[in-house]
Image: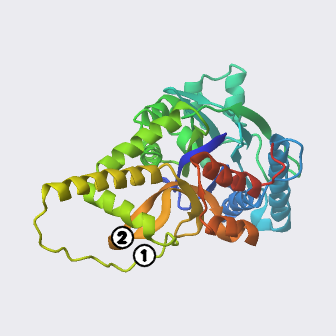
Amino acid sequence: MLRVAEHAELTDTGRQRRANEDAFFARAPLFVVADGMGGAQAGEVASATAIEVLAAGLGEGESVEQQLSTTVQQANAQIHALSVADDERAGMGTTITAAYVGENNVTLVHVGDSRCYRWRDGILERLTDDHSLVEEMVRQGQLTPEQALEHPQRSIITRALGPESVVEPDAQTINARDGDLLLLCSDGLSTMITDDQIAAVMARDKPLKATARGLIAAANEAGGRDNITVVLLRLEVLGGDAASDLEQTQVGLDVGQLPRAQATAGAAAAASVERRMPREPRAPAAKRRRRWKPGVGTLLALFAAALLLSGVYFASQAIYFVGADREGFVSVYQGVPYELPLGINLYREDYISGINLSQLPASERTTITEHSLRSRSDADDLVRQLELGRLGSSAP
Ligand code: MG
């Protein structure tokens, strides 16, 4: 099963515009970039409306492609209605590029000149075709891609949400591999820097937040003539592949770097302490040590106990549970749902989903707050199902 392991998103007004008419949405399983246009804040209204409609859930349709396309058409109808109803908003519009991360593949739906790229094995591939004048001229051989980048009409788009009462979105479903990185961006990135320059930033292989900052900085250094928005998401394939083995090894290394006394003390209390909510800190109750001189037998016994307890600790690290973080987002935790004195947690955050507890019906909320112990795949599956279910359980 596929999931979003990490995502980062950033928008910037750029160096020449006064307002930012771009908008984005980034909550698994849906990621969207919209680039609004039209005077007097109308562009902001258009892009915000598009995001609002998509965030509310998928529309009717037999496939995710159809459901996502229907939703985009609904957004178009809504923006068009707003533009007809108000002279100040006449002609407003927005691009839209949306990626829906399904169980086994990713569905892309797109209108306009915002883009989706895939970074895989060090190669950047553009997955969407711009609905723009210059791109059509490139396709017809009237311009080279380099000329298109400098063409004065490069921001004229031939398809958008809003200007017409109906719109035909491009839809496609793409395969995904473990480690694939998707980039959704507005033309404020792609008209300021070339694909090679985007690839050069991606190749630095930094955390996604840093990559997002790097892309925006590069577009601004190139002039920053438009609003710049980037949404990055890294895909992960869940299940019995080599990746999970690697992570187990990584956990072992992390724990090994803890002071041993802390790790074993943690395990000792884990066995006896009652189950607690992860967020309730426990009052410190440090014990005072007696002065004494241990004999060889005592040392051996302590050593054996330490071995046993570190075994317990390592075993607890193969356990996962589902809970909610401080902001209420449903998350997967590695370890057991207990806290020890001195603020030692016996769990660590493994994954934060885009689903907030407040969005769930009471029965599902209980499933999250009871903190049942689970295998990693069980915990991942539960959260993934919530993510997919939130936007229509009919998704295949
Ligand atoms: Mg733009």
**Of residues 279 and 300, the one drawn nearer to the viewer in this rendering:** 300
Quarter that holds the C terminus: top right
Q: List the residue tagged with mark 2.
A: 343
Q: Is 391 situated left or right of 325 in this image?
A: right
Ligand 1 has an atom within 8 Å of the beta carbon of the residue at disc 1: no
Q: List the residue tagged with mark 1.
A: 281
Q: Look at 14% across and 54% down and name the residue there.
A: 296
Q: Look at 70% across and 48% down and name the residue there.
A: 95
- Residue 369 % position (x, y): 62, 69
**Of residues 37 and 235, the one drawn nearer to the viewer in this rendering:** 235
Q: Look at 78% across and 37% down and name the residue there.
A: 170
Quarter that holds the N terminus: top right
Q: Amino acid at mark 2?
A: Gly
- Residue 138 % position (x, y): 67, 24
The answer to whether residue 35 of the structure is visible from this angle is no
Q: Secondary structure at mark 2?
A: helix
Mark 2 or mark 1, which has the lower sequence index? 1
Q: Amino acid at mark 1?
A: Pro
Q: Secondary structure at mark 1?
A: loop
Q: Are marks 2 and 1 in contact (CB under 8 Å)?
A: yes
Using the rendered view, name the quadrant where residue 205 is placed: top left
Q: Is 295 situated left or right of 38 in this image?
A: left
**Of residues 353 and 70, the one drawn nearer to the viewer in this rendering:** 353
- Residue 314 % position (x, y): 41, 49
The vertical placement of 90 against 60, above or below, is below
Q: Which mark is residue 78?
A: none
- Residue 7 % position (x, y): 54, 49
**Of residues 392 and 75, the one drawn nearer to the viewer in this rendering:** 392
